[in-house]
Image (cartoon, helix red, strand yellow):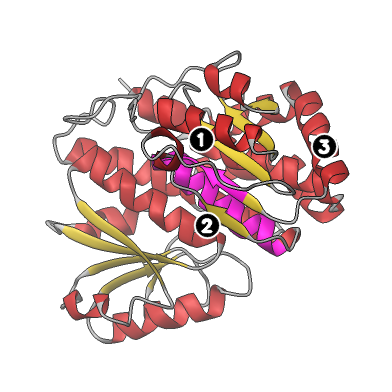
């Protein structure tokens, strides 16, 4: 019988379509607010998988809107009681449950400080929605597995739809509209060779740059959550500055490369490490020494990176079960972590 996690991975294309249809009005209103306020900068407020979605949106906003984006520690409000000067800026707060106390506190602080605050949440109404100027229901539907999958993807899709609406970028708008179909193709991909070659590995590196670095971070977290397996994400620009010292023969490396300006440099690092004996894989047809993993091209450099996480989710769910774990109920974890 399929796990809840597998079922939720299979639902990703439908969930994305549901979001784009059901939350179109909320996205349009928030996008208009962003156009009207014309923020000089953005901050993001999130933790865990939601923070990886925020990192993805950071790169997307910097590339498309050309606005600087910074991740703000929620504890500034909930623990330290600090109020940031955010007038003239905007804030994106991401929380599936909508009730993590520190995320809510920071969102409320940002709103009070004068920022245009937008909540991306799977629960409306919720405390995070009440604390923000605008709320977008990501419409992922119930997510029963502890490890987030469809809620991560829909958080990014909601943010990209908001970005397209804000900037009037027709290329991004079209690519977002086409995402459900692209994600449906991605769900069908299998990373069989990675499964066969990983063997008894106990540690891995995940590499990426730009939006794909957020995907690498999300992938590393999923290995830890579902399989008790140590995995770390690094920028392909930084892995050679220290972390490479741990890369021995057949040390596993997954390079998440999208069809963007960073594809060549990321693949070059993967090939370099493969040449040194690492068990390197890359989501690119440019790879010469690294093993090639199947991927879906979406036709846009930003959405292309998002599609990479879907076949990985399918792989890691199966890998977890093959190692004797229950991907629906990782040890010592719970669905909502109510950090103060």
Query: As rendered, which of 188 and 234 lies closer to the eye?
Result: 234
Q: Position of residue 142 (x, y in %)?
A: 48, 17
For label 3, the residue is 33
Sequence-wise, the earlier of marks 2 and 1 is 1
Q: Residue 197 vs residue 160: left or right? A: left
In this orientation, does residue 337 appear?
yes
Q: Is residue 198 above or below residue 288?
A: above
The numbered mark at residue 106 is 1
For label 2, the residue is 295
**Mark 3 to mark 1 CA distance (whole Å):** 20 Å
What are the residue bounds of the magenta stretch? 43-63
**Mark 3 to mark 2 CA distance (whole Å):** 36 Å
Closer to the observer: label 3 or label 2? 3
When asked about the image quadrant of residue 134, the answer is: top right
Q: Position of residue 20 (x, y in %)?
A: 72, 30
Label 3's element? helix
Q: Position of residue 131 (x, y in %)?
A: 60, 24
Q: Are marks 2 and 1 in contact (CB under 8 Å)?
A: no
**Mark 2 to mark 1 CA distance (whole Å):** 37 Å
**Which residue is depicted at the point 34% across and 76% down?**
239
Q: Position of residue 230 (x, y in %)?
A: 20, 54
Sequence-wise, the earlier of marks 3 and 2 is 3
Q: Residue 137 vs residue 66: left or right? A: left
In this orientation, does residue 186 appear?
no
Query: As rendered, which of 271 and 330 lies closer to the eye?
Result: 330
Q: Main secondary structure of the magenta part?
A: helix
């Amino acid at each position: 019988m399929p796990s809840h996690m597998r079922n939720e991975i299979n639902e990703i294309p439908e969930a994305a379509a549901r979001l784009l249809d059901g939350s179109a009005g909320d996205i349009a209103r928030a996008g208009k607010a962003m156009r009207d306020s014309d923020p000089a900068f953005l901050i993001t407020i999130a933790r865990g998988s939601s923070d990886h979605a925020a990192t993805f949106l950071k790169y997307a906003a910097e590339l498309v809107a050309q606005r600087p984006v910074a991740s703000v520690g929620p504890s500034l409000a909930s623990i330290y009681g600090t109020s940031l000067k955010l007038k003239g800026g905007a804030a994106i707060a991401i929380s599936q449950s909508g009730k993590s106390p520190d995320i809510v506190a920071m969102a409320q602080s940002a709103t009070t400080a004068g920022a245009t605050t937008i909540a991306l949440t799977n629960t409306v109404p919720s405390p995070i929605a009440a604390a923000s100027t605008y709320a977008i229901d990501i419409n992922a539907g119930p997510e029963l597995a502890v490890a987030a999958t469809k809620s991560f993807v829909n958080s990014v899709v909601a943010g990209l739809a908001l970005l397209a609406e804000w900037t009037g970028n027709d290329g991004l708008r079209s690519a977002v509209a086409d995402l459900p179909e692209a994600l449906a193709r991605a769900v069908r991909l299998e990373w069989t060779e990675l499964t066969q070659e990983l063997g008894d590995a106990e540690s891995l590196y995940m590499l990426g740059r730009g939006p794909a670095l957020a995907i690498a971070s999300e992938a590393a977290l999923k290995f830890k959550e579902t399989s008790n397996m140590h995995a770390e994400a690094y920028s392909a620009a930084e892995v050679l500055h220290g972390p490479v010292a741990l890369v021995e023969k057949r040390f596993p490396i997954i390079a998440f490369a999208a069809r963007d300006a960073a594809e060549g440099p990321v693949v070059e690092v993967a090939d370099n490490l493969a040449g040194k004996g690492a068990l390197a894989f890359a989501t690119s047809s440019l790879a010469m020494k690294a093993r090639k993993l199947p991927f879906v091209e979406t036709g846009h450099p930003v959405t292309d990176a998002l599609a990479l996480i879907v076949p990985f989710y399918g792989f890691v769910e199966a890998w977890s079960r093959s190692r004797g774990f229950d991907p629906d109920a990782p040890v010592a974890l719970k669905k909502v972590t109510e950090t103060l």
